[in-house]
Image: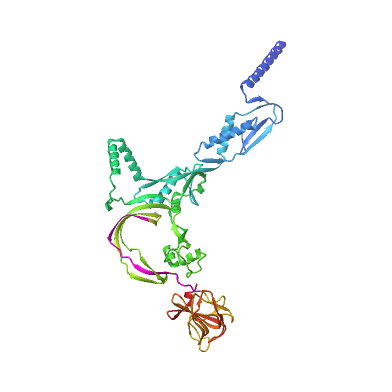
Amino acid sequence: MMKKISRHYKKMKIAYIKVAAAAIFVSILFFPTYQKLESTGDNIFTVYLNGTQVGSVEDSEQVDRCLIAARKRLAGTSDELVLADSEIRYEGSEVLWGTVDDPADITANMTRVLGNSVKETLNRSYTVKINEYTVNLASTEEVLALLQASIDKFDQENEYYVDLVLDGNRELNVLTTQIFSVREQQAEEMAAEEAMSSAGIDTALDEMFEDVEPAKEMEFSDYELGLKSLEYGDTVEVVESYLQDYELTSLENAIEEVTKDQEKEQIYEVVSGDTLSQIAEKNEIPLADLIAMNETIENENSMIRVGDELIVTVPEPELSVERMEEVYYEEDYEAEIVYVDNDDWYTTETKTLQEPSAGHRIVVANVSYRNREETGREILKEEVTYEAVPKIVERGTKIPPTYIKPISGGRLTSNFGRRKAPTRGASRNHKGVDWATPVGTAVMASSAGTVAKAGWGSGYGYVVYINHADGRQTRYGHLSKVLVSAGQTVSQGQKIALSGNTGVSTGPHVHFEILINGTQVNPFDYMN
């Protein structure tokens, strides 16, 4: 009996082994995750993403594909740009038989780990660039609101709106601005509707006959006054960007920054009649600031000439707006001055022949502005109520003589005017200027002319008088030697004498006077 049981048990054991072997064989055929691996060192790898196990693989290329798929899946969960850490680590081992994970499972695990490792989210944003100024906004709606705010302060009737268009001059996708007229668009739509109807034919005929008929002069009532054109005075560029929250500017602050006036430097060209104080007042800046901004100006008495260019500051917003308005106004006006040239007079001589009287007129004009500053005016229609009477001025055309210092160097020892008498017999009212200089220094004619006197003069010592073409006279005193004679013609800068210490004098020097109509004046007011 025992022998029969033992024989039966052996048969069952053999059958079990056969079934197990068949099961293993079937699993190898139908379950690819269980594989026979070649014994070549590490041949199966456990993958860790950011320190978390996400699966096992046979090669690293499969990991890269799964990571790319996981990143795409994570990015698809948000409209913004998502950044997440992704540190991959492998642990290898050598096995004869082993299992690897399905790529879909590895991708799912990686997506979960990346979601827990999000570093930061960058918002889809828009950077607005105006010259050198930039501001970052959260949406195109905010960009348009900012740009619209810059024109709304000049467009009270809401006749214009701004939109973003692709900049055709740029290879990359850069947006720029275009301002549209509501009135023009409505007119275009109406014209299109009329063209589609029978009335459109009538309109076309009317326009044809208008071209044939001569144009009639417009009356004041025919003009449609108001804003005629509006555009930005600066180039605006808008580009899409991805930024963090702290890099964005709120719409309210952006509008404040872009539309408020800033002090900006500009060039001002000096015109006839300008003075430094007038230029400062005209540009609403302190005179001291105007001097500080311009290296060529030393102080408030510095000379400026027509055509000189000065740096001034003007209040302007970051984004300037240029516009043209058609306006009606009435005004008093002045006629242009009428000049009558006199070739026998110097340019310093003038005489008013007729006093002016203002006229009055009514005007329609196109006035151009940059922000709030007028930049141009074109009169479209003018009707004079009564004519202005011009001022008539006779003026000389001859260039008057110039005057130079009569010596080179020297030390100024006495100015023109009241002084303490330096020696007995000297005048307390000094009628010229004195320069101390060694005896024998060359004395030159301050201006061209004819010698009126050359020799000894009481108080002056040796002296030279020269009469000039503009009626003025110059005198040179306390000379040691006279080199010209009365009646002689001299040129400007010609040597006429040598300095000395003759007459009433406290030491070697040259005394110099300029006389107008026989009266001494301050020479420094006339010397170049």
The answer to whether residue 444 is seen in the rendering is yes
Residue 435 locus on image (x, y percent): 54, 79
Q: Pick the residue in front: 42 or 528.
A: 528
Q: How is the image coloured?
A: rainbow
Q: Residue at x 67, y 16 (%)?
A: 18
Q: How many marks?
A: 0
Residue 384 on the magenta segment: yes
As drawn, is 400 to the left or to the right of 364? right
Residue 461 locus on image (x, y percent): 53, 86
Q: Pick the residue in front: 106 or 431.
A: 431
The image shows residue 440, relative to residue 235, as above or below, that is: below
The answer to whether residue 55 is seen in the rendering is no
Q: Quadrant of the N terminus?
A: top right
As drawn, is 167 to the left or to the right of 83? left
Q: Residue 385: which quarter of the image? A: bottom left
Q: Residue at x 30, y 63 (%)?
A: 388
Q: Residue at x 30, y 42 (%)?
A: 207
Residue 373 on the magenta segment: no
Q: Which residues are magenta?
A: 377-403
The image shows residue 523, relative to residue 147, as above or below, that is: below
The image shows residue 508, relative to residue 58, as above or below, that is: below
Residue 241 locus on image (x, y percent): 51, 44
Q: Pick the residue in front: 459 or 524.
A: 459
Secondary structure, magenta segment, majority class: strand
Residue 66 locus on image (x, y percent): 59, 32
